[in-house]
């Protein structure tokens, strides 16, 4: 296992962000390790790059012009980890607000191994903005 420098970690994070914003799934996956463990903001989990490709393909195909803005980044070179605070602007998928402009704020905890992202844990605030109005997310009723 080789260690990435702080600058190389920044480059990989920038490449990933640019690929997300170009809606380029292959570009994003180029930054991802074969053994990736990914957990999204709903708690869904995926292990392995090919399974992640399958999970993300529908989202990238019907992207609606989503855009991530990295607002802040903390890098721990010794631990090969990064924490990124982001803003997502996209057409809402929330019930009753479908297609309206939504802003969601969150954080990714990212770990690197062998020059790639091996772990990506995503967390999101439970209050989002839809067309400038703050909306509190609620757990789905069963």
Image (spheres, helix red, strand yellow):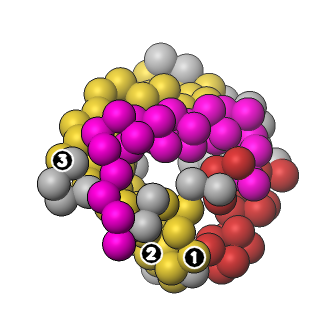
Q: Measured along the vertical axis of the image, is residue 83 above or below residue 123?
A: above
Place residue 22 in its image quadrant.
top right
Residue 90 seen in the figure: no
Which badge, 3 or 1, comes first in the chain's sequence?
1
Residue 118 part of the magenta-drawn span = no
- Mark sitting earlier along the chain (2/3): 2
Front-most of residues 53 and 94: 53
Q: Nearer the viewer, residue 23 or 14?
A: 14
Q: What is the secondary structure assignment of the residue under circle 2?
A: strand
Taking the spot 66% from the left edge, 79% from the top edge, the residue there is 51
The answer for how far apart the CA atoms under marks 2 and 3 are is 19 Å
Please give the label number shown on residue 76: 3
Q: Residues within 10 Å of mark 3 (few under 14, many from 20)?
A: few
Looking at the image, the residue that sits furthest to the top is 132
Q: Which residue position holds label 2?
A: 37
Left or right: residue 122 versus residue 131 is left
Q: x and y percent of residue 25 in the render?
A: 73, 52
Q: Which residue is mark 1?
A: 34
Q: Secondary structure at mark 1?
A: strand
The part of the chain drawn in magenta is: 1-26
Residue plotted at (75% across, 54% down): 26
Disc number placed over residue 52 in the picture, else none: none
Give percent across and percent down for residue 56: 68, 62
């Amino acid at each position: 296992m080789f260690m990435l420098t702080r600058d190389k970690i920044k480059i990989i994070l920038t490449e990933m962000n640019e690929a997300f914003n170009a809606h380029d799934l292959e570009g994003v996956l180029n930054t991802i390790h074969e053994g990736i463990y990914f957990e999204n903001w709903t708690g869904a989990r995926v292990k392995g790059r090919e399974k992640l490709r399958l999970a993300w393909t529908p989202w990238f195909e019907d992207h609606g012009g989503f855009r991530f803005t990295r607002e802040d980044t903390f890098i721990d070179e010794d631990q090969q980890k990064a924490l990124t605070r982001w803003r997502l602007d996209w057409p809402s998928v929330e019930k009753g607000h479908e297609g309206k402009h939504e802003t969601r704020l969150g954080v990714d905890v990212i770990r690197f191994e062998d020059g790639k992202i091996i772990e990506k844990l995503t967390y999101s605030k439970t209050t989002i903005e839809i067309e400038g109005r703050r909306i509190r997310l609620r757990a789905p009723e069963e």
